[in-house]
Image (spheres, rainbow, N blue to C red):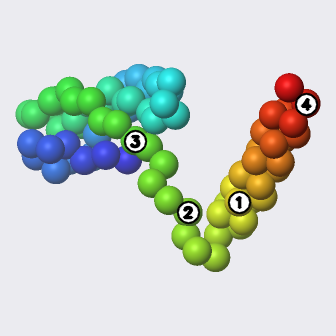
Amino acid sequence: MMRCPLCSTVGHTREATYLEDGSKETIVQCQNVYCSATFITHECFYMALENSPLKADYKSRLVQADAGAEQGSNNG
């Protein structure tokens, strides 16, 4: 949910597109009939919290990726 930057009313998502860098671009329209502004927002991953299972899973995937890269460079 994104609020309109002009009148602070809740906006309605008209279209969302995932970009190549993993972020999301969203076209939002204000629900206030007197404003009806249309604006674009960008959303991206910032960080996982310290005790998050997501962070533990991400670290294990990094270790696996590093191990795979080392094996690939040793074979070449």
- Disc 1: CA contacts within 10 A as few (<14), some (14-19) or many (>=20): few
- Disc 3: CA contacts within 10 A as few (<14), some (14-19) or many (>=20): few
Q: CA distance from mark 1 to mark 2?
A: 11 Å
Considering only vertical position in the picture, is 56 above or below 29? below
- Disc 4: CA contacts within 10 A as few (<14), some (14-19) or many (>=20): few
Residue sticking out furthest to the right: 75
Label drawn at residue 75: 4
Q: Is residue 8 visible?
A: yes
Of badges 1 and 4, nearer the viewer stands 4
Considering only vertical position in the picture, is 35 above or below 54? above
x then y, percent, for residue 42: 34, 37
Residue position for label 2: 48
Marks 1,4: beta carbons within 8 A: no
Residue position for label 3: 43
Label drawn at residue 59: 1
Q: Is residue 61 visible?
A: no
Mark 2 lies on a secondary structure that is loop
